[in-house]
Amino acid sequence: MLKKEKYSSGTVWEKNVGYSRAVKVGNIIEVSGTTAVNENGEIVGLDDAYQQACFIFQKIRMVLNIAGADLKDVVRTRMYVTDISHWEDVGRAHGEFFRKIKPAATLIEVNALVDPLLLVEIEATAIIGE
């Protein structure tokens, strides 16, 4: 049986909702939907989808590093925006972090996120190679 490791960022939402920031099973890491909320509960990049996306990718990198991986191990990203007109800003941020990696990627518009000031939420899947 494969070992399951759970990673937490310590937010109240993880405890109350019952989820982990990331879960590693074998060499696969699934990173939960991540938003531009910092450790103080403040939204980074108000009214700026590009800044929010960059902050999110940095948070994703951080949990991957803790789990023994890096952005180079990402094989899939899923990006959710509350306004599809932000696709270029979010895409630009994605390109800055993944231009050479080129994971499979999805970007879709959703009706809303948990806070109306959040413009972007991103998930990632990583597979650690040999």
Image (tube, rainbow, N blue to C red):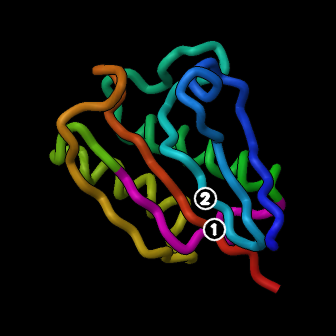
**In-front residue for pair 114/107:** 114
How far across and down, in percent of the image, does residue 25 sit? 73, 65
**In-front residue for pair 70/2:** 2
Q: Amino acid at mark 2?
A: Glu
Which one is earlier in the sequence, the residue at label 2 or at label 1?
Answer: 2
Which residue: 46% across, 62% down?
Answer: 77
The residue at the far front in this view is: 1
Which residues, given as a range, are shown in magenta?
Answer: 68-79
* Position above or below: 17 against 86: above
How far across and down, in percent of the image, does residue 33 sit? 48, 44
Dot 2 surroundings within 10 Å: few (below 14), some, or many (20 or more)?
many
**In-front residue for pair 89/65:** 65
Residue at which label 2 appears: 30
| Secondary structure beneath label 2 | strand
- Left or right: residue 74 versus residue 25 is left
Residue at which label 1 appears: 126
Dot 1 surroundings within 10 Å: few (below 14), some, or many (20 or more)?
many
- Left or right: residue 42 versus residue 24 is left
| Secondary structure beneath label 1 | strand
In the image, residue 70 lies in the stretch drawn in magenta? yes
How far across and down, in percent of the image, does residue 7 sit? 75, 43
Q: Quadrant of the N terminus?
A: bottom right
Q: Amino acid at mark 1?
A: Ala
- Left or right: residue 35 versus residue 8 is left
**Looking at the rendered structure, which numbered label has been put on residue 35?**
none
State the CA–CA distance, disc 2 to disc 1. Answer: 7 Å
Q: Quadrant of the C terminus?
A: bottom right
* Position above or below: 19 against 107: above
Which mark is in front, 2 or 1? Answer: 2
In the image, residue 62 lies in the stretch drawn in magenta? no
